[in-house]
Image (tube, helix red, strand yellow):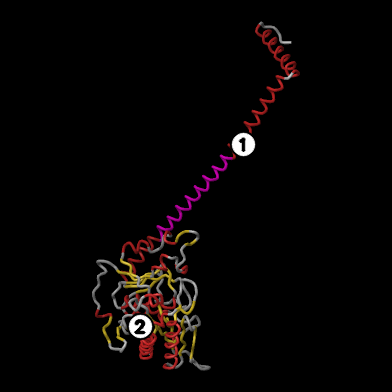
């Protein structure tokens, strides 16, 4: 399997060279989250066919080609292989060969398969090719390191040679800024619930303030950088799972950990190729602990902020209700005053009429006579 994987990536590098500018032509118009180019189609098909022809009893799955297998009736799967045809497709389209874009291959041990599928810990081999640099990054179960090769399969080094650990000075984290700041699966959408996504607090705000965050816009490349120790770890609030096993394999073979934001290890998680929105923290135990602590603090802060916003909204709504009620009361009072004014005007008009003068004049005379009798101590008649 090792040779088949490495040779598949070498062939992919050759095809990239052969196609030149044609590789980055967009061939599928979907939503803004994913760009599909001729490279995704050509490279995906090449890798899939090479693996199917080289290794018996395998199933290969990719985004653009789905599942393909060379299993015969009654045969059991020897390997399940997940590939990412081209990761960092937008870098391929606009990077002119300077920005990272990669192909990824991860194999799972068929003997470990259960009714639920494969666990992340069931990986057997993992590798990727960075086309821009011409480097292949490779590991396998039990190797204990990530190896680096050129496209002629000459070994250039491995993760054990990079022993410098500057995490005491500053932790450098690979990440996916789009997933973090653009609402995960919303991709490049500008708003969420009517609010600009750039103004929505994220679980990683504190983490990014405390540490250096790097995003090359190619997740597989960032996984490789973590694997060889150039980055101290990886963190993201929402990732598509099809490429995550490579990060897991690179992390485990270099002595690290990989957990979700709840702190649950990926070891026993079931791998789902088409699943998305997976939170992930990866690195050595010190990095994972520090990042997890920052995320927990930010999540709590966000909850408190949400509560404060809810209380503010409730007070604002109550204030609006009181304004409406006050307006209604003012309107009722104004209408009552208007009616009273009209009543007074009516009475005054009646008083001035002949009949009114006769009636009110008599009443006034009676009132004056009674008042005089009372003041004289006489009975009122």
Residue lying at the far front in this picture: please name it.
21
Q: CA distance from mark 1 to mark 2?
A: 77 Å
Would you name the residue on which mark 2 appears?
Answer: 129
The image position of residue 39, as x and y in percent, is 42, 82
The image position of residue 198, as x and y in percent, is 42, 61
**Main SS type for the magenta part?**
helix
Determine which quarter of the picture holds residue 321: top right
Residue lying at the far right in this picture: please name it.
355
> Where is the C terminus found, in terms of image quarters?
top right
Determine which quarter of the picture holds residue 99: bottom left
Question: Foreground: 157 or 191?
Answer: 191
Residue at left offset 38%, top offset 91%: 4
The image position of residue 355, as x and y in percent, is 76, 18
Position of 335 with respect to 119 (left or right) is right
Segment tinted magenta in the rendering: 299-327
Is disc 2 placed on a helix, strand or loop? strand
Residue at left offset 65%, top offset 29%: 340
> Eyeballing the image, is 57 above or below 222?
below
Question: Foreground: 258 or 25?
Answer: 25
Question: Foreground: 257 or 194?
Answer: 194
> Eyeballing the image, is 379 above or below 160?
above
Residue at left offset 26%, top offset 84%: 156
Is disc 1 placed on a helix, strand or loop? helix
The image position of residue 329, as x and y in percent, is 59, 38
For label 1, the crowd category at 10 Å Cα-Cα, with few meaning under 14, some 14 to 19 and many 20 or more, is few
Q: Which mark is residue 351?
A: none
Would you name the residue on which mark 1 appears?
Answer: 332
């Amino acid at each position: 399997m090792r040779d088949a994987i490495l040779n598949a990536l070498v062939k992919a590098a050759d095809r990239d060279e052969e196609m030149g500018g044609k590789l980055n032509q967009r061939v599928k118009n979907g939503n803004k989250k994913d760009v599909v180019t001729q490279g995704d189609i050509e490279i995906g098909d090449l890798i899939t066919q090479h693996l199917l022809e080289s290794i018996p009893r395998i199933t290969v799955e990719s985004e653009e080609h789905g599942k393909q297998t060379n299993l015969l009736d009654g045969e059991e799967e020897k390997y399940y292989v997940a590939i990412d045809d081209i990761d960092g497709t937008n870098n391929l389209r606009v990077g002119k060969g300077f920005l990272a874009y990669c192909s990824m291959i991860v194999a799972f041990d068929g003997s470990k398969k259960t009714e639920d599928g494969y666990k992340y810990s069931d990986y057997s081999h993992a590798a990727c090719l960075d086309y821009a640099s011409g480097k292949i990054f490779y590991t396998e179960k039990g190797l204990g390191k990530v190896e680096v090769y050129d496209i002629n399969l000459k070994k250039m080094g491995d993760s054990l040679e990079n022993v410098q650990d500057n995490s005491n000075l500053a932790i450098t984290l690979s990440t996916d800024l789009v997933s973090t700041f653009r609402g995960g699966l919303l991709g490049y959408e500008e708003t969420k619930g009517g609010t600009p996504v750039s103004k929505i607090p994220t679980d990683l705000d504190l983490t990014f303030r405390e540490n250096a965050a790097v995003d090359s816009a190619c997740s597989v490349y960032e996984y490789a950088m973590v694997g060889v120790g150039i980055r101290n770890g990886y963190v993201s609030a929402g990732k598509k799972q099809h490429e995550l096993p490579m990060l897991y394999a690179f992390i485990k073979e270099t002595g690290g950990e990989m957990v979700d934001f709840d702190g649950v290890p990926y070891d026993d998680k079931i791998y789902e190729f088409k699943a998305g929105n997976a939170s992930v923290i990866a690195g050595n135990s010190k990095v994972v602990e520090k990042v997890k602590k920052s995320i927990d603090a930010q999540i709590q802060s966000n909850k408190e902020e949400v509560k404060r916003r809810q209380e503010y909204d409730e007070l604002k709504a109550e204030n609006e209700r009181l304004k409406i009620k006050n307006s209604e009361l003012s309107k009722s009072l104004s209408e009552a005053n208007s009616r009273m004014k009209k009543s007074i005007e009516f009475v005054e008009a009646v008083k001035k009429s002949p009949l009114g003068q006769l009636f009110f004049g008599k009443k006034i005379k009676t009132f004056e006579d009674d008042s005089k009798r009372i003041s004289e101590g006489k009975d009122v008649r």
